[in-house]
Image (spheres, rainbow, N blue to C red):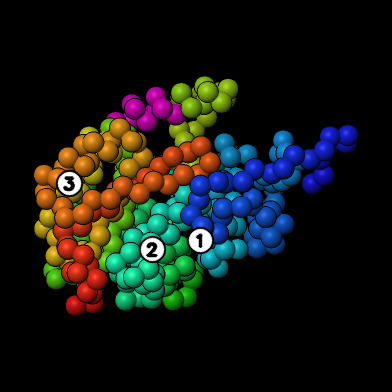
Amino acid sequence: MPAPPGRPPRTPPTKPGLHPRNRHAGVYDFQTLLKASPDLGPFVLRARHGGPSIDFADPAAVKALNRALLVEAYGIRGWDLPPGYLCPPIPGRADYVHHLADLLAADADGAIPRGTRIRVLDVGLGASAIYPLIGHREYGWSFVGSEFDAVALDAAARILAANPGLGQAILLRRQTDPNAVFRGVVEAGERFDLTLCNPPFHGSMKAVRAAAQAKWQKLGRGSDRPLRNFGGQDVELWCEGGEAGFIRRMIAESVDLRDRVRWFTTLVSSSASLPAVHRALRQVEARDIRTVAMAQGQKQSRFVAWTFLEAEARRSFSSKA
């Protein structure tokens, strides 16, 4: 797609701050993406820099881009979402996975543990199953994904069924208690090298709507726009107590699994939540607490990791025991 006549093309934007192993750190190669997923074609337009892009405010365009990225980078076929379900930004999700690999590597003299012997629990899998898909394709890890929403769980199962071999590496479990995190999901004696989570951010649906309205006003768009350009069901967007409340419940339940999980982790979207999270971790006497910063351009994020195991116990830890 050439630049307008008489106007030199600008340098396309990059995504600084992403992890060095992140496949999506550079500019999207739309020519390659279109070959991998022709369905992206109708959504490609010419950006201000003169190169191809999509309208990131269009949920259908964002989903089509995600589908193309998953085919091209990870060989994932048949990826789709039910209408209105959360469509994750893949570069940021991949960053979390790569930083988790570094967390494990720090307990293994810098070598990233790979293969299905590494077991990961994804709390709140979502319809996209994005973390297990990326984690298995990049590092060969095995996953258990828990999910309260039956529609989301069915959608994730369809994605796995469309990709031979994934159903053996990624197990799906229904969480029947909306107030539980690990209870009812982790089986007796079961062990995990990692847990990960992207908790609901808001404390009420009213807060979700207010945030969405403020976003569209800032962008100069109409108020009839969807709640989020990447979708999201109620259970994905808000919970009692918001992000900090959910994480506090997770921390409280993690005590019962103190000897059966090497590292617990969760995304923390708001830096304002960190003091409460760290205070809760000190109260349960976590042995090691780490906050790992992540960035994608101007967007700042982070995850918090904690463990009840000493360094030597982490080095010798086996989730297969």
Which residue is the extreme one toward the right?
A: 6
Residue range (magenta): 204-212
Spot occupied by residue 195 in the image (x, y as percentages of width and height) = 28, 59
Q: How many marks?
A: 3
Left or right position of 4 against 264: right
Residue beneath the point at 62% across and 46% down: 14
Between 93 and 175, the one nearer to me in the picture: 93
Question: Picture quarter containing residue 308?
Answer: bottom left
Is residue 272 part of the magenta span, yes or no? no
The answer for how far apart the CA atoms under marks 3 and 2 are is 22 Å
Disc 3: which residue = 281
Residue beneath the point at 24% across and 71% down: 315
Disc 2 marks which amino acid?
A: Ala
Q: Earlier in the sequence, mark 3 or mark 2?
A: 2
Disc 1: which residue = 21
How packed mark 3 is, by other alpha carbons closer than 10 Å (few <14, some 14-19, many 20 or more), is many
Picture disc at residue 101: 2
Left or right position of 42 against 247: right
Q: Secondary structure at mark 1?
A: loop
The answer for how far apart the CA atoms under marks 1 and 3 are is 30 Å
